[in-house]
Image (cartoon, rainbow, N blue to C red):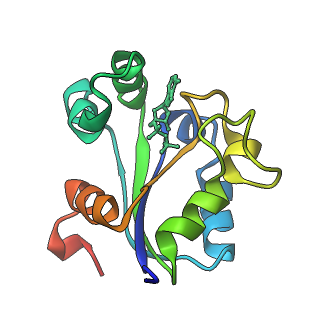
Amino acid sequence: MATNKTFTMIKPDAFSAGNSGAITKMIEEAGFSIKAMKLTKLTAETAGKFYAVHSERPFYNDLCAYMSSGAIIAMILEKDNAVEDFRKLIGATNPADAAEGTIRKIFAKSIEANAVHGSDSDENAAIEGSFFFSELEKI
Ligand code: IDP
């Protein structure tokens, strides 16, 4: 079934490099509408909660430290088939494997500092959106 909402973060590497505007432009030009948006900063603890599913992975502690190392921009996006189409727009987790023209291919620095997050399912999109935004903050 076609889906219509996903959740993204512009990660600390991309925000601190001044790439937020260029990334947001690519997202809008690909047909996504911004339904919620905020500039914020995670703590190691809140990053740990967001990425709890990865708590057994060897990179978990580094990921939490990296994701709390600077400001991020969180967004809820809307489009037909949003989850799948956004994963295509951002490209593979490792920028070395990402397709030409994808956000990660253009802006990611490494497999960890890979510029953007994109939800991997409708269920996670809803959970992740509500992690950052109250009902009042969603349009
Ligand atoms: P995804 O963000 O493409 O869905 P996941 O496997 O869910 O990829 O991993 C979550 C995040 O953890 C990645 O976006 C990346 O920042 C980091 N990560 C994934 N694999 C590695 C790794 O092998 N080393 C270091 N960091 C990783």
The vertical placement of 59 against 113, above or below, is: above
The percent position of residue 129, horizontal first and vertical second, equals 29, 62
The residue lying at 24 percent from left, 34 percent from top is 52
Q: Quadrant of residue 68?
A: top left
Q: Quadrant of residue 115?
A: top right
Residue sitting farthest toward the right: 100
> 99 and 78: which one is in front?
99
Left or right, 76 with reference to 88: left
The percent position of residue 12, horizontal first and vertical second, equals 49, 35
The residue lying at 39 percent from left, 15 percent from top is 58
Residue sitting farthest toward the front: 1
> 26 and 83: which one is in front?
83
The residue lying at 43 percent from left, 51 percent from top is 73
Left or right, 1 with reference to 46: right
Q: Quadrant of the N terminus?
A: bottom left
The residue lying at 33 percent from left, 17 percent from top is 61
Q: Quadrant of the C terminus?
A: bottom left
The percent position of residue 83, horizontal first and vertical second, equals 48, 67
The vertical placement of 52 against 92, above or below, is: above
The percent position of residue 72, horizontal first and vertical second, equals 42, 43
